[in-house]
Amino acid sequence: MPVSDAAGKTRMMQVVYPQHLNHQGNLFGGEALRLMDTAAFVAATRQSRKTMVTVAVEKIDYEAPVRHGEVVEIDASVVNTGRTSVTVEVEMHAEVLLSGERRRCGTGRFVFVAVDEDGHSVALA
Ligand SMILES: CC(C)(COP(=O)(O)OP(=O)(O)OC[C@H]1O[C@@H](n2cnc3c(N)ncnc32)[C@H](O)[C@@H]1OP(=O)(O)O)[C@@H](O)C(=O)NCCC(=O)NCCS
């Protein structure tokens, strides 16, 4: 999945294929969470340039379904840094490629912690 952009920000695209679907033919919520966590992880790591682990998924809202064959676009932005933690907010949009129609389908808020080789939290700088 392509990932782009600068420190503290990430945009990630994924075409919704059959293996991403739930029994209703829409993007499975667990798959959406995986995509959001991945984009947020890259944004947090670009911010810190340290090994980051997810410590909390503070909130996820699924506002509208993403359908088979659409492109799901995830935008992740760092919104806060603490001593060892980085908080990232994520927006998920769906796009119908043939028409260009675009709609917001969800949001999320993730917290990551910088860790050392033993998995203990370390200061960001
Ligand atoms: C990440 C981990 C090392 C932190 O442990 P710790 O150092 O004892 O945690 P602390 O309580 O000292 O908190 C460290 C930072 O995380 C933040 N934090 C901890 N738990 C949090 C939570 N539930 N929600 C939000 N922030 C949290 C703290 O506020 C603190 O931030 P700051 O240093 O910027 O002020 C530990 O919780 C861990 O290993 N978790 C598993 C991580 C993992 O495997 N993730 C993959 C998902 S399965």
Image (cartoon, rainbow, N blue to C red):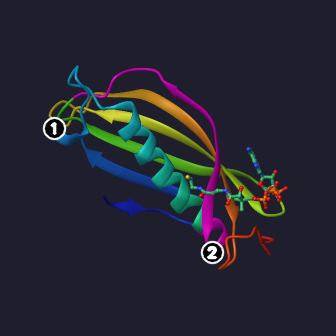
Q: What residue type is disc 1 on? A: Pro
How far apart are labels 1 and 2 at the CA level?
Answer: 35 Å
Residue 85: percent from left, percent from top = 75, 58
Range of residues picked out in magenta: 46-67
Residue 104: percent from left, percent from top = 43, 28
Which residue sits at x=54%, y=65%? 6
Against 1, residue 23 (above or below) is above
Earlier in the chain: of badge 1 and badge 2, it is 1
Q: Magenta segment: does it hold 17?
A: no
Q: Secondary structure at mark 1?
A: helix
Which residue sits at x=24%, y=27%? 67
Viewport quadrant of the N terminus = bottom left
Tag of residue 49: 2
Is residue 17 visible in the rendered structure shown here? no
Q: Residues within 10 Å of mark 2 (few under 14, many from 20)?
A: some
Please tell me in which quadrant of the rendered image residue 48 appears.
bottom right
